[in-house]
Amino acid sequence: QVQLVESGGGLVQAGGSLRLSCVASGRTFSSYAMGWFRQAPGKDREFVAAIGWLGVGTYYTDSVEGRFTISRDNAKNTLYLQMNSLKPEDTAVYYCAASVVRIVVVTEQEYDFWGQGTQVTVSS
């Protein structure tokens, strides 16, 4: 079992940057593949980025490729999402998630634990 707590969301102008963090409880953080998802108002939750259990292997949805960077610090039990060149369409609640499948996974169904989410709002 792992508990996840996101932080770092907020209001930013288009073109700006934010860094999201997700701190995991427990001593087995390094055993999980991790991912970021987001849900905009009135839309389904969608995949954003994922990283393998040792930080080897990352994958991004097309709309954030080149702008967002996922990373992890296993010594700090922390997952990050650096978001640059933000656009109004990036506005959403962002969730981190953990999967016992250690390789990079991109579907919601493969994730076992979820955080409560952090709001990101990008103004035009």
Image (cartoon, rainbow, N blue to C red):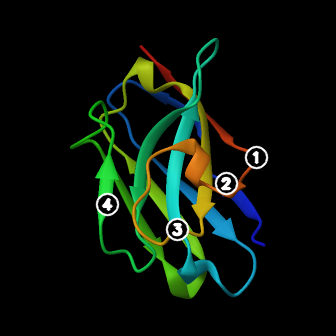
> Residue 124, percent across and down?
41, 13
- From the image, state whether disc 1 or disc 2 is nearer to you: 1
- 108 shown above or below 75: above
* Of the pair 99 and 93, the residue shown nearer to us: 99
The three-letter code of the residue at mark 3 reads Val
Left or right of 122? Residue 67 is: left
Whether residue 8 is visible, yes or no, is no
Query: Mark 2 highlights which residue?
Result: 6
Q: Is residue 93 left or right of residue 52?
A: right
Rendered residue at 76%/46% (across/down): 116
- Label drawn at residue 61: none
Q: Nearer the viewer, mark 3 or mark 2?
A: 3
- Which secondary structure, mark 4? strand
Query: Is label 1 in contact with label 2 (beta carbons under 8 Å)?
Result: yes
Q: Which residue is mark 4?
A: 58
Q: Which residue is mark 3?
A: 101
* Mark before the other along the chain sequence, 1 or 4: 4
Question: Of the residues tagged 4 and 3, which is closer to the observer?
Answer: 3
> Is 81 left, or right, of 58 in this rendering?
right
Q: Earlier in the sequence, mark 1 or mark 2?
A: 2
Which element type, helix, strand or loop, lies under badge 1? loop
The quadrant of the image that shows the N terminus is bottom right
Estimate the x, y position of residue 30 in percent, counting from the top left.
54, 82
Upstream in sequence: badge 4 or badge 3: 4
> CA gap, disc 3 to disc 2?
21 Å
Picture coordinates of residue 10, whole percent (x, y): 60, 37
Q: Nearer the viewer, mark 4 or mark 2?
A: 4
Where residue 116 is drawn, which disc sits there? Answer: 1
